[in-house]
Amino acid sequence: MTLLITGARPYGEDAADILVEDGRIVAIGEDLAATGAEVVRAAGLVALPGLVDLHTHLREPGREDAETVETGSRAAALGGYTAVHAMANTDPVADTAGVVEQVWRLGQQAGLVDVVPVGAVTVGLAGERLAELGAMADSAARVRVFSDDGHCVADPALMRRALEYVKALDGVVAQHAEEPRLTVGAQMHEGDRSARLGLTGWPAAAEEAIIARDVLLADHVGARLHVCHVSTAGSVEILRWAKSRGVQVTAEVTPHHLLLTDECAEGYDPVFKVNPPLRTDTDVQAVRLGLAEGVIDAVATDHAPHAVEDKETEWASARPGMLGLEQALSVVVATMVETGLLDWRGVADRMSARPAAIGRLDGGGLHAHGRPLAPGEPANLLLVDPGTRAVVDPAALASRSRNSPYAGRELPGRVVATFLRGVPTVLDGKAQK
Ligand SMILES: [Zn+2]
């Protein structure tokens, strides 16, 4: 199949045509022609490499009422993603080769994005003994990212052993940094506002203490560590220090931690309840600067669909978590591009190249992700209309759940098309054939 995308602006730079054959980009340049090609008119649209998410909760197996691999894959494609890492806190937990292969196969069947399973670090996410890390790495799913996300690997001796094992697999431990003894009953960021609202606080120190401990452990054993959803200014400081010492640590920030603050809790609307919690304006500024500087490597959605009965209830009993896949790029445009903190090449680096490298998806071959827009590379790309602004309507989302914190908010940057190995998974009418 031959595809000709005309007049797009790769990385927001000069307009060019992009010619795709058999899943690969074969040429980028002016006035390309190809007989019999399917033509996509992309004048004014920015072309970026397909996005890669390190942190998606797809809920299948176990909570298909909240999301399935297929509905989550559709949400991802609509957000411009071509690969997503599916977190392990399913039911059953993805702690064996059998479960990760099941999730991987469901992703292949849906065929909208490459679904890359994350393996649990500990059996049943219980934090007591290591899961079958080697068997998951050797499985058809080729697991390289291991995480108990939702739970912290709190036992330092177990964390050390996990880092040692995963190092031998060329993998990485992605830590949900939350010292559980400091967050018992926690409902929101601990500060003046939590005291006034009468909600138990989740102190910044509970995140920072684990990050500090784990960068020291990673340094000691010479392993790779990845920190999930960094949310505080102090965490950015610790990461900067660790990187300056050569520790192999990477980190991600979510779109919601780039945009929203604990002020959202004022109305007690549980759509804003999330773990780690929304922080202060000072923290938001610090994570934006950390992402711009590269101390935070990647944007990861922590897309966390929840059924209505689990979310539309009292704040204290609501599950933490927010949808993210469909609005992630728009939030990054609003918080990082329109503020001048990142250009489009920076967006491509933080949302495609670096997350793919962390997940070891960037090797050669047609199934690689995070590769540049260049001849010879897999044709994983998106087209975004940077100027269009739209109000987010949760009812219009592809996710099976509706817990979007951006409901009613106007955001810039609409994804018009997404291509997975040259095949359109999303193709808006605006890009006329
Ligand atoms: Zn988490």
Image (spheres, grey):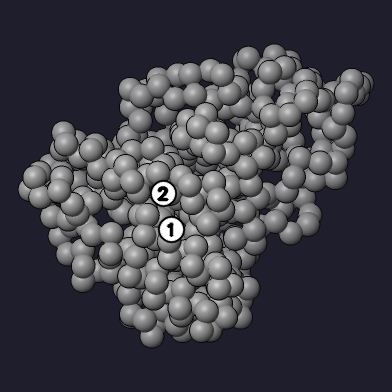
Q: Quick one: label 1 or label 2, which is nearer the N terminus? A: 1
Q: Is residue 386 left or right of residue 402?
A: right
The residue type indicated by label 1 comes to: Val
Label 1, secondary structure: give it: helix
In percent of width and height, residue 404 lies at 34, 34
Q: Give the label on residue 236, or none.
A: 1
Vertical placement of residue 142 versus 194, above or below: below
Name the residue located 10 percent from the left edge and 50 percent from the top edge. Answer: 195
Labelled disc at residue 338: none
Say which residue appears at 28% left-offset and 64% top-offset. 205
Secondary element at tag 2 = helix
Tell me whether the residue at label 1 lies in contact with that at label 2, contact meaning CB atoms closer than 8 angstroms: yes
Task: Give the alpha-carbon distance from disc 1 to disc 2, as whole Å.
Answer: 7 Å
Q: Which residue is drawn at 50% across and 77% down?
A: 218
Relative vertical location of residue 358 with respect to residue 416 in this rendering, above or below: below
Q: Position of residue 200 (x, y in %)?
A: 13, 55
Tell me: 396 left or right of 170.
left
Residue 86 vertical placement versus 134 (above, below) = above
